[in-house]
Image: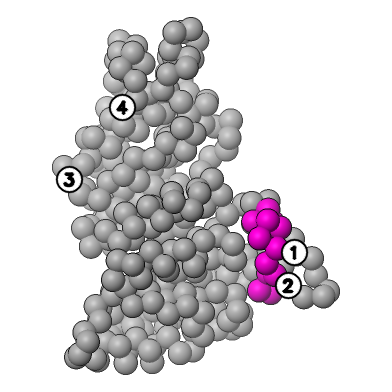
Amino acid sequence: MKLVVISGRSGSGKTTALHVLEDIGYYCVDNLPVTLLRDLIVELSSRKSPQIKEVAIGIDARNSVTQLEMLPNVLRDLSAEGIDSEVIYLDAMDSVLVKRFSETRRRHPISNDTNTLNEAIERERDMLHPVASSASLIINTSKLNLHELRDLIKKRVGAGNEGMALLFQSFGFKNGVPGDADLVFDVRCLPNPHWIPNLRSQTGRDPDVQTFLQGHEQVQEMLDDISAFLVAWLPRFVANNRSYMTIAIGCTGGQHRSVYITEKLTEQFKPDFPNVQARHREL
């Protein structure tokens, strides 16, 4: 049996993630007390008919701090009993969570008459720290809309049986480094198509921009060096039972150089990693 624990701060998209997994065949339970997790999984795994092979459990801050601190040990015990488990943790910037709650006018699960929404959001982060620390994959949903989040969950978590999932993500440093990146490569030292008037409005996906970048030797050198690093080290992450890897490629605006390098790396690693995606944050 495969167990996926979906957790994260309120407003980050946990319910959406569970609905996606339910749609692709997972048996889903939301807001489960950690104290009941082991008994539930043992019960489900012992069923013969109907047979349940994939389970997704939503766990959030409505558990007590003591219960949340128990989660890593519970998962270790289940692993010793042959249950393949992983934790997917969703989060977003504080300002984004405040905006989402303000727009929906929903009450924060741990807010009360004595604290503000901001204080509840900060408190929830502290409460969920033990869960976030044990996560196999952290997804920052700050800049994802509902459809993008659904697609990301379906491709990254739903396709997890195909081996380690790789996400190559381009971004612009002027908008901040992605919070969920495992590795970050800075390609701002490469020639910038932004300063060529007819290329400025195009992106690294366009043939003219690609031709410009391919005409500079240092671009290929950078691509070769990043590729060599990943070829050498990704198998070691796989050997260490790593299920997910987010590799972020950044340039100044996230339009040209980082997009080009991201596309090339995705193309190169597809044959060896069936579950490979490219995402361009700024496009």
Q: CA distance from mark 2 to mark 1?
A: 6 Å
Say whether residue 158 is magenta. Answer: no
The residue labelled by disc 1 is 117
Bounds of the magenta span?
98-110
* Residue at 54%, 32% in the rendered image: 173
Q: Nearer the viewer, mark 3 or mark 2?
A: 2
User: Observer-nearest residue: 111 or 238?
Assistant: 111
Which callout, 1 or 4, points at the residue further toward the start of the chain?
1
Closer mark to the observer between disc 3 and disc 1: 1
Question: x and y percent of residue 46 in the render?
Answer: 24, 91
Task: Write down the residue under mark 3.
Answer: 272
Q: In the image, 152: left or right of 1?
A: right
> Residue under circle 4?
223
- In this view, 105 is above or below 96: below
* 4 or 3: tag closer to the N-terminus: 4
Distance CA(mark 3)–CA(mark 2): 47 Å
Is tag 2's residue or tag 4's residue first in the polypeptide sequence?
Answer: 2
Q: Circle 4 — which element?
A: helix
Task: Find out whether residue 109 is within the magenta segment.
Answer: yes
Mark 3 and mark 1 lie on one chain; the one further toward the N terminus is 1
Q: Amino acid at mark 2?
A: Ser
- Mark 2 touches mark 1? (CB < 8 Å): yes
User: Is 117 rendered above or below residue 182?
Assistant: below
Do callouts 2 and 4 mark residues in contact (Cβ within 8 Å)? no
State the residue position of label 2.
Answer: 111
Residue 133 seen: no
The answer to whether the residue labelled 3 contacts the one labelled 2, judged by CB atoms less than 8 Å apart, is: no
Please state which amino acid type lies under the numbered disc 4.
Leu
Mark 1–mark 4 distance (CA, rounded to whole Å)? 45 Å
